[in-house]
Image (spheres, rainbow, N blue to C red):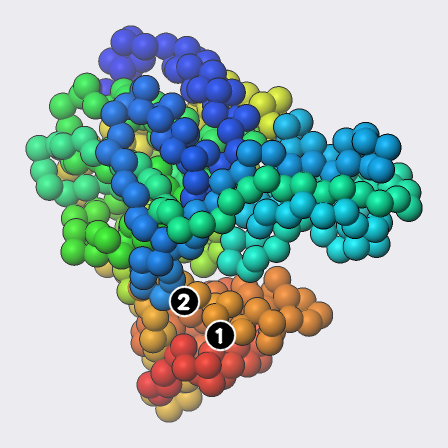
Amino acid sequence: MNYSEFQKLKKIPEIGTEMYDIMVKLYPICRSITGDGVRKTLGIISEQVPLEKYEIPTGTEVFDWMVPKEWNIKDAYVKKSNGEKIIDFQKSNLHVLNYSVPVHETVSLSKLKDHLFTLPDQPTLIPYRTSYYHENWGFCLTHNQLLQLEEDEYEVVIDSTLEDGSLSYGEYFIKGESEDEVLLSCYICHPSMCNDSLSGVVLLTFLAKYLKNLSLQYSYRFLFIPETIGAIAWLSRNEQNVTKIKHGLVATCVGDSGILTYKKSRQGNAEIDQTVIDVLKNSGDDYKIMDYEPIGSDERQFCSPGFNLPVGSLLRTGATYFTEYHTSADNTEFVKAKYLADSFSKYFKVILTLEENFGKFYSKNNKEELPEIDSKNDQVFLNLNPKCEPKLDKTGVYRKIGGENQRDNIKTIFWVLNFSDGKHSLRHISSRSGIDFKQIKHAAEFLHEKKLLKRIL
Ligand SMILES: [Zn+2]
């Protein structure tokens, strides 16, 4: 089936509306990396496509990580001494620091402030904050509201549980003629936010729904997983089968008004990269191409050096590039059905192109281009945890490298870990990342000292 035949079957704008309606249904659910919000979400997706659901118990080791305790929440609020509720989880689930431990205390304003998160530069928005691996409790609110808080005794209640349980995820598999697979992955761990997370979830749900009735060459595997830990857990359970994955895309941020952006796979010239770029070129619409960087979503795990799968990410405005990112403004107004529909059509065309080119495409020029190592002058390291990211907080990396620019330092660490595959020198990592060589070298020495890297040259 080609694209115009598909269009005759179903109008793309209608699919946009269907996706939007499911997104609106999913929006109010308080999700996290574990818990009943995820199960409820998988349940709603299952009404569209029958997911295979999995539960991985707390404490299960997945590469360098461990499945955490399961978090659930019923209610949370902050009340003034006169009984007035000033922060209420029932009004927005973003009000609670995601993964907050239970608390019921009466506290002064200054103690309360230690547990409040706001965005001073966006004073009307509620931020989205998490504390998955460090036990804490907290509330998120608008900065304007914070400025109005007066001295008082505040009753804080978080009616949550953090207990042994499991991590839930869903998978949907469409068997094609071939064992070769196309991996399509999205994440289901964000609470009430639309573009980041939910737009990708509904896009893949409907892609699965409409692909399942076609006769296909490739087999298609759809993942509905919590971000990072879910991708790591999935890869650790499916390590034996990942060689079947010939192409892949991570779907997120596909519902905003921005132009389509394609972030290439780590390999950079894999068939999926060529295919998406061709589809965007031929679409007649504006688009943007980004080289791979080890920052972003689950492509970080799929493209970790131990896997290096041909997985890119096709999105509109990337996370962190839109001001609504990780705030209450990433809502059902921000995402529009017509943009979801447009993203759907692009994904669909990518798949039809992969299908058309099955068994005959770029295989000849599809070899990853590797730089030449200068054995006299280059310094080369090997990542000792090449499969997915190592759990950096265990080694105190985050605390140790804190300082003037924590975010840049972490980015440098990720670059060094991701490209220390024995085939890229520090010089190459510096030129590919655009990060100053001295900083790259400093990060490599630090990681070497932490026994995360081994020097091979
Ligand atoms: Zn996010």
Q: Secondary structure at mark 1?
A: helix
Determine whether the residue tagged by mark 2 lies in a helix, strand or loop.
Answer: loop
Q: CA distance from mark 1 to mark 2?
A: 9 Å
Work out whether residue 329 or residue 26 is closer to the camera in this orientation and state it: 26
x 80%, y 43%: residue:
154
Q: Name the residue located 60 percent from the left edge and 34 percent from the top edge.
A: 75
Q: What amino acid is labelled 2 in the image?
A: Pro
Identify the residue position indicated by label 1 in the image.
395
- Relative horizontal placement of residue 301, taking residue 218 as reference (left or right): right
Horizontal and vertical percent for residue 171? 27, 36
Report the front residue among 12 and 71. Answer: 71
Q: Is residue 402 above or below residue 345?
A: below
| Residue 443 position (above or below residue 42) | below
Residue highlighted by disc 2: 390
Looking at numbered disc 1 in the image, what kind of residue is underneath it? Thr
Query: Circles 1 and 2: CB distance less than 8 Å?
Result: yes
Q: Quadrant of the N terminus?
A: top left
Residue 111 spot, x, y in % from top left: 79, 55
Q: Position of residue 300 (x, y in %)?
A: 41, 55
